[in-house]
Image: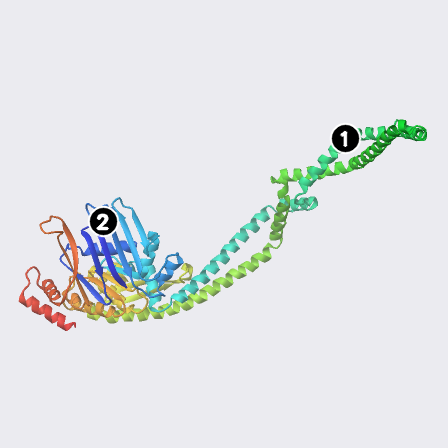
Amino acid sequence: MLVQLSIRDIVLIERLDLEFDAGLSVLTGETGAGKSILLDSLSLALGGRGDGSLVRHGADKGQVTAVFDVGADHPARKLLRSNDIDDDGDLVFRRVQSGDGRTRVFINDQPASVALMREAGSLLVEIHGQHDDRALIDTDAHRALLDVFGVLSERTADVGRLHEGWREAERALKAHRAKVEEARREADWLRSSVDELEKLHPVEGEEEELAIRRSLMMKSEKMASDINEANEVLNGQGSPMPVISGLVRRLERKAQEAPELLNDTVSALDAALNALADAQTAVEAALRAADFNPRELEETEERLFALRGAARKYNVPVEALPELAARMVADLSDLDAGEERLAAMETRVREAKAAFLHAAEQLSERRHKTGEALAAAVMAELPALKLERAEFLVEIASDIAHAGPSGIDSVAFHVRTNPGSRPGPIMKVASGGELSRFLLALKVALADRGSAPTLVFDEIDTGVGGAVADAIGKRLKRLSAGVQVLSVTHAPQVAARAATHLLIAKGPTEAGSKTVSTRVSTMGADARREEIARMLAGEHVTDEARAAAGRLLEGNV
């Protein structure tokens, strides 16, 4: 529930700290005292629309802080945790409104978005006015309220999942059918392309390998003549090796006679002969390395040019040809096996649709029964609200053609305000005063079925009095047994049933000051009797009004 509301520099409120208790709390005061300011401030703290005009004159910014005490498993806490907001302790919603229209949002002192504040706030507080209430305006909300009353929300979620499965199967079928049809249009070209690429059989990295091999063979071709010339010098008829070898043998024989003269020469010639032999070996190795089959160069070039030609034809890099070939083969397989796959996918769509419709029809049956029960529960509240001649109807239209995530039903609350008249949508048929009473009856019927922990009613008793106002007070009191109820009221019969009575007044900020501000005070027994007497009597409070106020309070102890 809402436990505290702090307001700083909002319209006529300079500084205000309010604490709220469980049960029914009423806010009363003269017209123009600032009751709407309190509700606007609360709405601001719940993610309502910000406006720079809300900032008090002379201040740069205003601020509203709302503190909530809810259970550990409350949906608002789960929502905050899912958005990485710490939810330990009380939930503190703070909204800072600047005079230039900008706002800042904090939830538990962590920066947050207005959207998150609005979503979480809707789980904590429902604000209902006489002429503007989503529960009565939005027909989608009618279906949601019916599901809450019948404890059908889980079933509706299951139906939603089946609906998504059906739609996903349809989307897959549509995509595959389009793919097959496109393949059919290009079947001849696709088959010839697949044949060509299968014959070519491109391999990843092949182009680079072929290019390197071709470059080496072309270089070898150019250098082969030079290597052959070197080989001819070393191994041909003009080779110096036999001459040097003969010299070495002759000098070796004569070196025995004059070793000091010839040993160095023989050693040098022998080294030269060994170097020439090493050179001969190296040239022969180079010759073998440079030796290639010209046919191999031709084949390499043909393969390389074929790959590059295919790449140009299909407008892809050579390295992408293997992937292209695989994709074309897959496309051709889709074409060849398309009819079989289409049949299987069509069967899957029919099965998914049938499962959804079966669950939706079962849900629809439950909703029709629940609609009768909800109508009866609301009708039971109407006589005391002086709507005994009215009839509340839950109209449910089931149409498979308009199936959606919530099923096949559209739900609308209709009313008949007078016997013999034609029933119609509640927003079109009921007057403002009747709307407020229908809303109250609906809320009483839904009191223990998942309502927000705090309900705010803004002058729903406007235009009624006497027994009707007393009936409204009784039902607000009964409603407050399960949820916290805040009511802005002008009806003394409603005010007398409150557990907490807050008086809203407007007056000078300081003695002698021309600046006015709104103040809120919690009234004790005597002050409360006087305020209810004022509500009964008007401008001048009489003893008779005080006595009547006393009787109202005594009757509501």
Mark drawn on residue 354: none
Question: Which is more foreground, mark 2 or mark 1?
Answer: 1
Element class at badge 2: helix
Please tell me which residue lies in front, 343 or 554: 554
| Residue type, numbered disc 1 | Met
The image shows residue 184 at horizontal and vertical percentages of 59, 49
Q: Residue furthest front?
A: 260
**Residue 46, placed above or below residue 553:** above
User: Mark 1 or mark 2, which is nearer the start of the sequence?
Assistant: 2
Residue nearest the viewer, comparing 276 with 114: 276
User: Of 107 and 44, which appears nearest the observer?
Assistant: 107
Left or right: 516 with respect to 129? left
Q: Badges 2 and 1: C-beta atoms under 8 Å apart?
A: no
Position above or below: 189 against 423: above
On screen, residue 326 above or below 422: above
User: How far is mark 2 from mark 1, CA to CA?
Assistant: 91 Å
Query: Can see residue 461?
Result: no
Q: Position of residue 472 (x, y in %)?
A: 20, 67
Horizontally, is 356 left or right of 138 in the view?
A: right
- The residue carrying mark 1 is 223
Q: Tell me the quarter of the image containing the C terminus.
A: bottom left
Residue 25 in percent (x, y) is at 21, 64
At mark 1, the secondary structure is: helix
Indicate the quadrant where residue 128 lies: bottom left
Please say whether residue 116 is visible from this viewpoint.
yes
**Image quadrant where residue 537 sits:** bottom left
Q: Which residue is mark 2?
A: 54
Q: Residues within 10 Å of mark 2 (few under 14, many from 20)?
A: many
Amino acid type, callout 2: Leu
Characterize the local packing of mark 1: few (<14), some (14-19) or many (20 or more) Cα atoms within 10 angstroms. Answer: some
Image x and y of residue 193, in percent: 65, 44
